[in-house]
Amino acid sequence: MFLFNYRYRLKCIFKDKQLMFWTFLFPILLATLFNLAFSNISSSDNFVKVNVAVIQNEALDQNPAFTQAINGADHLFVVQNTTQAEADTLLKDNQIDGYITFDPDLKLVVNQSGLNQTIIRGFLDDYVQSNATIVTVITQNPGALQSGSLDGISNRTEYLTAVSASQANPDPVVNYFYALIAMTCLYGGFLGIKEVVAIQADLSAVGARINLAPTNKLTVFLSSMLAATTIQMLELMILLTFISGVLGISFGDQPGYIVLTCLVGSLTGVTFGACLASIIKQGEGLKIGILIGSTMTMCFLAGMMSADIKYVVMTKAPILAYLNPANLITDSFYALYYYNTHTQFFTDILLLCGFTLIFSAVTYFVLRRQKYASL
């Protein structure tokens, strides 16, 4: 009976076009839109060198140290040596961000304010400060130049070293896709609702027949939930393959743990929907409405619409993060991608298992107490 009902529920789910759209096609469509919207975020963070012109005149010829300094900053600037008239034309046409001239002192000319102009101003301020320091030292100690005391005055030493928590490169986009997968896991609640409705005699004709049949209600329910979880896992595997293989989003190099996360997330989503369906006595439409509202709220708090929301929740109300299954699923993928240890990962998985047990227990105790006066 278990295998018969399992195969029967698999066929019923596959033939439900509306259900297959929301749990399978919609996440793939949303992932495609995410990729189109966020594909240029990482590339937009690449630094572009600042275009700057330097006016050639006698005052510049008398300051060879400045020419050497700005030419040495080729990692910051694209330098053009021009006349005054040429520089004015280039600035007017926005072909350069500003130009530098000695007139007779060092001077910066720009036509607007912005990041590039600030970079030029910062470089000039640093040069003026270093130059003033050298002049002061030589004035007070003329022998400093011959002794080599000024050799390192213009050098900048970094005493802090950035160390990554893992070998993965930081990517602001991946969290949106992790939250999308969390949403897909919780959308397994649609399947859970369908399976509970299918065994409730007052909500479906199939449920009436099941309650009249001489079969163990728990066996029927467990086989139905297994069928729903099987479909959900299959959909998730296809979605992961699409996101990683077609869209190029990395999930790290730990496929076993990734599959485990999908399995636990699927169980959490399916049992969540079953729990809602068992508690809410009204029709299927209301159950689905509450499922969608609660799922999207949890995904919003997990950073699906804005990564800043996830950060605010973690810093201002961390208890909400640990009570949010969508956030736990997202963090599980995040931990596998970024961290070299599995402490956070297993913490998230254990919490998800706890939610699954709670949802399952509530569903079981509610359904076993349901009695029908007549069918």
Image (tube, rainbow, N blue to C red):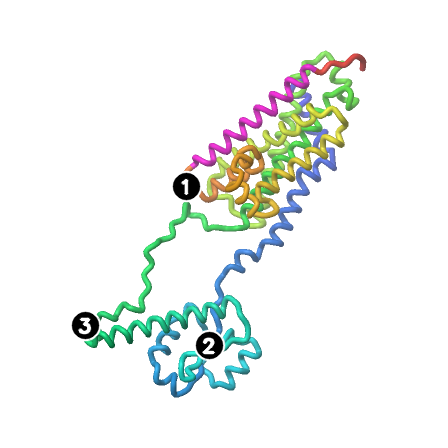
- Tell me how far mark 3 sits from mark 1, CA to CA: 49 Å
Q: Position of residue 351 (x, y in %)?
A: 52, 30
Residue located beneath label 2 in the image? 108
Q: Is residue 357 magenta?
A: yes
**Crowd rating for badge 2 (residues with CA inside 10 Å; few <14, some 14–19, many 20+):** some
Whether pointer 3 and pointer 1 mark residues with C-beta atoms closer than 8 Å, the reply is no
Q: Quadrant of the N terminus?
A: top right
Q: Mark number for residue 5?
A: none
Kindly identify the amino acid type of the residue bearing the numbered disc 2: Leu
In this picture, is 180 found above or below 140? above
- Tell me how far mark 1 sits from mark 2, CA to CA: 48 Å
**Identity of the residue drawn at 30% across and 71% down:** 133
Q: Quadrant of the C terminus?
A: top right
- Tell me how far mark 3 sits from mark 2, CA to CA: 34 Å
User: Which of 212/245 is in front?
Assistant: 212
Q: Quadrant of residue 329?
A: top right
**Identity of the residue drawn at 62% across and 54% down:** 37
Q: Position of residue 327 (x, y in %)?
A: 55, 38
Furthest residue to the bottom?
A: 58
Residue located beneath label 3 in the image? 147
Relative to residue 111, is residue 32 drawn left or right?
Answer: right
**Span shown in magenta:** 342-369
**Crowd rating for badge 3 (residues with CA inside 10 Å; few <14, some 14–19, many 20+):** few
Q: Nearer the viewer, mark 1 or mark 2?
A: 2
**Which SS class for mark 2?**
strand
Residue located beneath label 1 in the image? 340
Kindly identify the amino acid type of the residue bearing the numbered disc 1: Asn
* Label whose residue precedes the other's in the sequence (1 or 2): 2
